[in-house]
Amino acid sequence: MNNTTQPSILLIYTGGTIGMIENPETGALLNYDFEQFQHLVPEMKRFNINIGSYTFRPPIDSSDMEPKYWVRMARVIAENYEAYDGFVVLHGTDTMAFTASALSFMLENLGKPVVITGAQLPIGQLRTDGKENLLTSIEIAAARNAAGEPAVPEVCIFFENRLMRGNRTTKINAEGFNAFRSYNCPPLADAGIRIKYDTAQIRRPDPLRPFRPHYTFDSRIFILTLFPGITEEYVDAVVHMKGLRALVIQTYGSGNAPQKPWLFEKLKDFDRRGGILVNTTRCSLGTVEMHRYETGLQLLQAGAVNGYDGTLECTVTKLMFLLGQTSSKEEILRLLNTNIAGEITISAE
Ligand code: ASP
């Protein structure tokens, strides 16, 4: 904990459009160094905040994001946890929601803000959204509530005036500045003339337990997206994939799948062989309710776990995280049915 009155924030620059520059010959955007772009935001010096930095070398386009980089981010946060009051992660927008979800599971009982942000236009361009996103993220990461505690001790995404719980977000726009949504969870704060925090929504750590980072993942999962006309051969190939430990089934509506006996049999067989099935819906708003229709019930009977109202990014990273923590199927199923970082709303089925 920082004892001086001036808060300390660690900026972790991983890459992404926010720090890119145009190659004058090809016109394509390339990553460049954080030090080079710091001078483009002189406003940072006007904060009464001590800002440290850590740069990924080389910075990466977030399309190249992988669990090993999540581990690096979590380690940087853990190693600097006592020295800083909050963390701002600069990240490409493409996989930002995956990173936010992964970090929310890795950083157990987090007591300090981790605000992830980026931009749709490089920070060096005149109409950039990056400056606004960066400056407000720093302010939020340093903010304290009336009790003097960190205002938002959560992993969040700040984008286009809105602070969202990281594991509830999804990127929905490849062009507009308003690129992220949190359909099933209200924003944690809105930034207008003032930053208005929704304190009732904000999660707080358990004061009796320590902050505990975790660093292991297992990516041996597959996303099976259902579509009308899906064939038996396709599903058969998926469930017999070598080494596959878990299958996320992207179903229709409230968790429905075609009523094909072969589909039920193949999924049931995967479950019997020790595989884990999670039912998540293609719909952005709302939740999976497997009891609602016969078409959902058969997935429940095949052994599928409810993915509730979690985003695909959240379901995928949670599964990879849990598979990395334990080999006990029973424990993984229990934790999939538990809201561990504000990621799902458990409805009574
Ligand atoms: N491709 C970039 C990335 O995700 C896009 C962005 O930053 O917005 O790294």
Image (cartoon, rainbow, N blue to C red):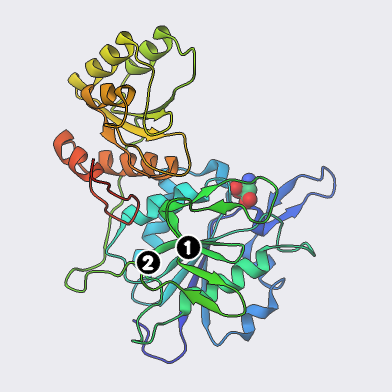
- Give left or right: position of 143 versus 339: right
- Residue 95, given in percent of the width and then of the height, sits at 52, 46
Residue 9: tell me if it is visible. no
The 10 Å Cα crowd at callout 2, few under 14, some 14 to 19, many 20 or more, is some
Q: Amino acid at mark 1?
A: Pro
Q: Which numbered disc covers residue 211?
A: none
- Give left or right: position of 124 versus 226: right
Residue 291: tell me if it is visible. yes
- Gap between marks 1 and 2 measured at Cα: 8 Å
- Looking at the figure, which quarter contains the N terminus? bottom left
SS for tag 1? loop
Q: Of callouts 1 and 2, which one flags the residue occurring earlier in the amino acid sequence? A: 1
- Looking at the figure, which quarter contains the C terminus? top left
- Residue 337, given in percent of the width and then of the height, sits at 23, 43
Q: Is residue 129 above or below residue 282?
A: below
Write the residue at 30% across / 22% down.
294
Q: Are marks 1 and 2 in contact (CB under 8 Å)?
A: yes
Write the residue at 36% across / 89% down.
3
Residue annotated with mark 2: 201
Q: Amino acid at mark 2?
A: Gln
Ligand 1 has an atom within 8 Å of the beta carbon of the residue at disc 2: no
Near-viewer residue (208 or 294): 294
Write the residue at 46% across / 80% down.
143
Q: Residue furthest right?
A: 25
- Give left or right: position of 154 versus 227: left
Q: Which numbered disc covers residue 187?
A: 1
Q: Is residue 33 above or below residue 47?
A: above
- Residue 151, given in percent of the width and then of the height, sits at 40, 77
